[in-house]
Image (cartoon, grey):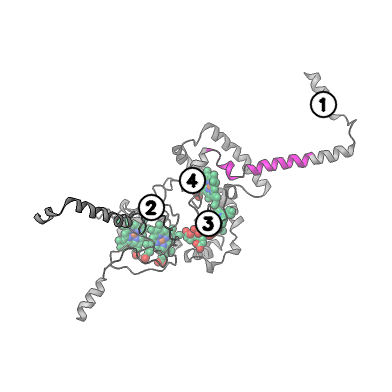
Amino acid sequence: MRDFLRRYWRTLTRPSAYYSLGFLTIGGFVAGVLSWGAFNTAMEFTNTEQFCIACHEMRDNVYQEIQPTIHFTNRSGVRAKCSDCHVPKDWTHKMARKMQASKEVWGWIFGTISTREKFLAKRRELAEREWVRMRANDSLECRNCHEFGSMDFTRQSKRAAEAHSTSLQSGEKTCIDCHKGIAHRLPDMAKQ
Amino acid sequence: MKCLATIPKGFVFLSLLLLTPAFAQQAHDPLRPGAGFAEDPKTAPLVNAENDDKKRVRSYAMQPPTIPHKTDNYQLDRFANRCMMCHARTRAPETQATPISITHYMDRDGNFLADVSPRRYFCDQCHVVQMEGQPPPVRSTFRDVDEIIRGKARK
């Protein structure tokens, strides 16, 4: 076994006798681009709605609930996908979130929220986590689509304009402080 | 009764038979007014709720005021009460919503509770939105008590 490994190691470390340096450089570059592309494509796939609702935990709970809300169908025909609100756009944060999500795969395997009852029991904790995250990044995901600078208060309803021109403008509050439950039903809010 | 009995049975049957098409045409599904069972009526477009925050007249002192804003997708179940997130006593300074009045804290024996009474928890049981430019679906002959008193006084 050790001999076998040593032989391979030697092959790997010895300069190539068959291929030119140019071929290796360009070939390596192309292979790198391809695998990077494949990696990102795979990552993109995990961002699609189909992927998110492939497990019944998501399909039977949150996906059902988002359907009557404005982010599913609206007069403008723009849909906010799961990843638009739950996955940061820039690469570093996206990777960090995907690593975290690996833990959620464990939850799926062990059926942490495999029934509606288990989901409801766990819901406050899950929601709380999203609220903390969005408060920390100043509701970045909302702002990717809704830009404060592009809001025309004169076009908003009275209640909206009132709230947005005061504590939102001053930065005292962020979107998620007032718009909890925008896409799903809220967890039990009476619990502490 | 006697004269009814003199009418031949066949005649009664025939006239009933003649009437049926008329019935069939009138027969309609109460859930789909204005259309027969077999027809495929065009649905009227949806109308938005008025959303201008303008208080409307209360027709009598005990009337639950109608809601002057839209309530689309406001959650109101055992988990959360979206209305109370603005209309609670403590939320008024921030939201400028009228806090619920004292009657909402009373149980049926007239005791004042610390929070909204269970029988007032489901707000939409009494408070409703008004649809933009829609005439009331049911005609009403209600007259304001002021009008009645003043009407009497003028006479």
Q: What residue type is labelled 1?
A: Trp
Quarter of the image where the C terminus of chain B is located:
bottom left
The residue mark sitting in front, 4 or 1, is: 4
User: Which residue in the protein does label 3 denote?
Assistant: A74
Residues packed near mark 4 inside 10 Å, few (<14), some (14 to 19) or many (20 plus): some
The answer to whether the residue labelled 1 contacts the one labelled 2, judged by CB atoms less than 8 Å apart, is no
User: Which residue in the protein does label 1 denote?
Assistant: A9
Q: Residue B38: which disc?
A: 2
Q: How far apart are marks 2 and 3 (CA)?
A: 32 Å
Q: Which amino acid does label 2 sit on?
A: Ala
The secondary element bearing badge 2 is classed as loop
The residue mark sitting in front, 1 or 3, is: 3
Which badge, 1 or 3, is on the more N-terminal residue? 1
The residue lying at 62 percent from left, 49 percent from top is A88
The residue mark sitting in front, 2 or 4, is: 2
Q: How far apart are marks 1 and 3 (CA)?
A: 60 Å
Q: In which quarter of the image is residue A4?
A: top right
The residue mark sitting in front, 1 or 2, is: 2
Magenta highlight range: A31-55
The residue mark sitting in front, 2 or 3, is: 2
Q: Residue B83: which disc?
A: none
User: Which residue in the protein does label 4 denote?
Assistant: A64
The residue lying at 20 percent from left, 51 percent from top is B10
User: Is there one chain holding both mark 3 and mark 4?
Assistant: yes
Residue in front for this viewpoint, A100 or B133: B133
Chain at tag 4: A
Chain at tag 2: B
Left or right position of A117 against A25: left
